[in-house]
Structure formats: C-alpha cells, structure tokens
C-alpha cells in the first residue's frame, strides 16, 4: 500500500464525532492488544482442519490444511477472518491487565480504540464486549493501513501521540503519516511476538500491559 495513506471518509466521519479535547492521545488497536486473537484464531482454524504453516507473523500465504504445505488462497483467508468475527468475536478473551493499565493511563491521556473489522455489523458486538471488560473508550472502525486515520486523530493534540498496535504494516503506515508518534508494537501471543523483528521506528516491543503503562507514563514526565 502506498504511504502515507489517505483516511477514508468513513473513519474521518467517526473522528469528527469525537468530543473536542487538547489532552494527549493514545490510539490503541484491539485484536492481539486488548483482546486475544492469535491463539483464538489458531483454535478456530484447527476446528476447520487448518493450521499456520510457520510461526511467522502473517495470515495470507501462511495457513494450510493440516498435513499440507500448500497455503489456502488470499480470498479463503479473507473469508475465514470474516467468519471468525461473525462467529467468535463476542467471546474473545481480555489480554491480562489491559483494562487496569488503560484505566490508570486515562487519568492523564485520552484513549481512542482504532480497530479493523470486516464490516460495520461487527462493531456493536465488539463495543459490548469491551464495555463488559471495563474498556469503555470510543471505538473507531477502520479498514486497511491506519496511518491516515492516526494523523487525522493527532490534529490539535499535544505531541507525542502514542500508537499501540500488533501489526507491522500499521506501524509502517503510522511512521509514514505521523513520524512524531511514539510507536508501541504490542503482541500478546508470545510465539507471534517472538517472530517479530521490530523496525527502527518501533519504540517498544512488548506483550505486557504493566510495562506498557509504565513506558507511557514516563513520556509525560519527560515532556
Ligand atoms: Mg491487531
């Protein structure tokens, strides 16, 4: 995808509906950051006689029938992700400590959740689950790379904005659109995290919410 990306009209509309604020901002992803995804998706695949081919941190080209080395098509992966959201997203599990760390940070920071979902019909299910887990922050839905949306969210806010996401593609995108962002690559699953080689624009690679909270807490004390 060409960077920097232009935010979609759909995400800009959601951003314009947020209350105006000049507090510093944390933009936080959901899957594999606040809600477990990789392990749950692996179980979902196994029930369909599918598995990841390698521990590499990607879906496309990396999922195959158990016992085969031939990956399923990109379209088949897309359909599996859609099915996962429709059938499983209401029972994803909370990543340990995400609720309390975000609650602590919210005393000094605004928090916006920026999540990629297959369709708008998936959003209310996710909002309810997050509310039930004590993660009640505004949820914006996006598709594709997140840099454009994050740059739009930064407008009028103090520097730095903090961006938390598991996806290397989203971090590349944010670095292109908003180089001043503090970038935390959070990957809850330890096997997926072990496969990550963090790019130079990553300020912290972790799967630990206490460490994330302390790292972000140290930013304002330095400003
Ligand atoms: Mg994610």
Image (cartoon, grey):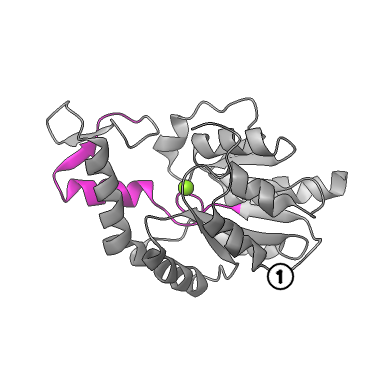
Q: Is residue 69 left or right of residue 102?
A: left
Asked if 22 appears above or below 134 in the picture, the reply is: above
- For the C terminus, give its image quadrant: top right
Q: Element type at marker 1?
A: loop
Residue 206 x, y percent position in the rendering: 57, 40
Can you identify the residue that label 1 sits on? Answer: 19
Residue farthest to the front, as pictured: 9
Query: In the image, what residue occupies the spot 40% across and 61% down?
Result: 93
Task: Give the class, few, some or many, for how many residues have Cα within 10 Å of label 1's Cα (few <14, many ≥20).
Answer: few
Question: 176 or 45: which is nearer to us?
Answer: 176
Query: Does residue 216 belong to the magenta stretch?
Result: no
Pointer 1 residue Cβ closer than 8 Å to ligand 1: no
Asked if 54 appears above or below 94 in the picture, the reply is: above
Q: Is residue 60 visible?
A: yes
Q: Is residue 101 visible?
A: no
Q: Is residue 209 left or right of residue 194?
A: right
For the image shown, how many numbered marks are present on the structure? Answer: 1
Asked if 114 appears above or below 124 in the picture, the reply is: above
Query: In the image, what residue occupies the spot 25% across and 49% down?
Result: 80
Residue 147 x, y percent position in the rendering: 60, 42
Query: Does residue 43 belong to the magenta stretch?
Result: yes
Segment colored magenta: 28-55
Question: 188 or 83: which is nearer to us?
Answer: 83
Residue 145 x, y percent position in the rendering: 51, 42
Query: In the image, what residue occupies the spot 57% across and 71% down?
Result: 136
Residue 155 x, y percent position in the rendering: 75, 52
Which image quadrant is residue 64 in? Answer: top left
Q: Is residue 116 left or right of residue 62?
A: right
Which image quadrant is residue 172 in? Answer: top right
Q: Is residue 172 left or right of residue 87?
A: right
Query: In the image, what residue occupies the spot 29% across and 62% down?
Result: 86
């Amino acid at each position: 995808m060409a960077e920097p990306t232009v935010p979609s009209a759909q995400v800009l509309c959601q951003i314009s509906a947020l209350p105006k604020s000049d507090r510093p901002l944390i933009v936080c992803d959901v899957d594999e950051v606040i809600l477990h995804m990789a392990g749950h998706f692996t179980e979902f695949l196994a029930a369909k006689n599918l598995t990841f081919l390698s521990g590499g941190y990607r879906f496309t080209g990396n999922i195959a029938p158990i016992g085969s080395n031939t990956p399923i098509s990109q379209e088949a992966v897309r359909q599996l992700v859609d099915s996962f959201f429709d059938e499983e997203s209401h029972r994803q599990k909370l990543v340990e400590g995400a609720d309390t760390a975000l609650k602590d940070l919210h005393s000094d920071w605004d928090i916006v959740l920026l999540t990629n979902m297959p369709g708008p019909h998936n959003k209310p299910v996710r909002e309810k689950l997050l509310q039930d887990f004590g993660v009640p922050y505004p949820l914006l839905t996006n598709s594709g790379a997140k840099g454009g949306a994050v740059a739009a969210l930064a407008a009028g806010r103090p520097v730095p904005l903090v961006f938390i996401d598991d996806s290397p593609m989203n971090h590349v995108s944010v670095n292109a659109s908003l180089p001043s962002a503090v970038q935390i690559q959070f990957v809850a699953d330890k096997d997926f995290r072990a496969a990550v080689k963090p790019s130079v624009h990553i300020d912290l690679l972790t799967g630990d919410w206490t460490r994330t909270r302390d790292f972000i807490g140290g930013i304002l004390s330095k400003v």
